[in-house]
Image (cartoon, helix red, strand yellow):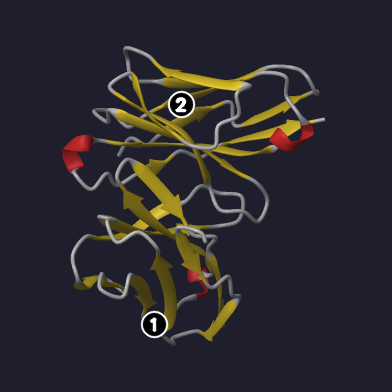
Amino acid sequence: AAGVIQSPRHLIKEKRETATLKCYPIPRHDTVYWYQQGPGQDPQFLISFYEKMQSDKGSIPDRFSAQQFSDYHSELNMSSLELGDSALYFCASSTKGQGAREQYFGPGTRLTVT
Amino acid sequence: QKEVEQNSGPLSVPEGAIASLNCTYSDRGSQSFFWYRQYSGKSPELIMSIYSNGDKEDGRFTAQLNKASQYVSLLIRDSQPSDSATYLCAVNTGNQFYFGTGTSLTVIP
């Protein structure tokens, strides 16, 4: 079965640079969620999109922005990167048709800011 | 107070034993409850979902939900070394999804 695809899998950036993470949801899933997970931490919800519109917002810094495109893929744009942004970034997808919104996670992008 | 609380562990059980993982949540309006398994450096993998009071069994896994007590649990029967991982409890409240900090489980051969 097709899963959530994220790219790149690893990314190394320097402070103050920008980064763009991409997420391709499971086919026919209309909702995308972004999470940030630091070492030893639980996943922290950043932002979600449903049908290309922002659905909910969590602890996403103002330096970050995201959008969902017409083909339902999503991009997380991160600017003025800081050392503390180093983390695993997960994308998850679900479909409202499932009602309970079971989320399926992608493999993640490991971002290292030096 | 966090929305979802779990004992961080570590929890160690011998191979073949029953592992019991617990989770409490703060919002009585929460609708859906999930257990994810996460290996180190990997993404969370959905293993169980439960929406109504009672037990739900899937293979060696049983999820238990008690909305009155705001309590969710996961039982793993016949624990295997491959079950060693961090188990995350997640709760869906409105449009938000809240995770606990996870319980680290080690199954000793």
Element assignment for label 2? strand
Quadrant where the N terminus of chain A lies? top left
Q: Position of residue B68 (x, y in %)?
A: 25, 73
Q: Give the amino acid at mark 1.
A: Asp
Whether residue B74 is situated above or below residue A36 in the rendered picture: below
Location of residue A98 (image quadrant): top left
Query: Residue at 61% of width from left, 75% of height from top?
Result: B10
Tell whether A85 sits left or right of A44.
right
Quick one: label 1, few (<14), some, or many (20+) residues within 10 Å? Answer: some
Quadrant where the C terminus of chain A lies? top right
Q: Give the amino acid at mark 2.
A: Cys
Whether residue B86 is situated above or below residue A85 in the rendered picture: below
Q: Are marks 2 and 1 in contact (CB under 8 Å)?
A: no
Query: Residue at 63% of width from left, 21% of height from top?
Result: A63
Whether residue B40 is situated above or below residue A30 in the rendered picture: below
Mark 1 — residue?
B78
Q: Position of residue B86 (x, y in %)?
A: 53, 64
Q: Position of residue B65 (x, y in %)?
A: 27, 71
Q: Looking at the image, can residue B78 be seen? A: yes
Q: CA distance from mark 2 to mark 1?
A: 36 Å
Query: Residue at 49% of width from left, 84% of height from top?
Result: B15
Tell whether A86 sits left or right of A53.
right
Tag shown at residue A44: none
Quick one: label 2, few (<14), some, or many (20+) residues within 10 Å? Answer: many
Q: Position of residue B62 (x, y in %)?
A: 29, 74
Whether residue A40 is situated above or below residue A22 in the rendered picture: below
Element assignment for label 1? loop
Which of A48/B42 is in front? Answer: A48
Which of B28/A87 is in front? Answer: B28
Tell whether A59 sits left or right of A79.
left
Mark 2 — residue?
A23
Q: Please report, as a chain letter, where disc 1 is located.
A: B
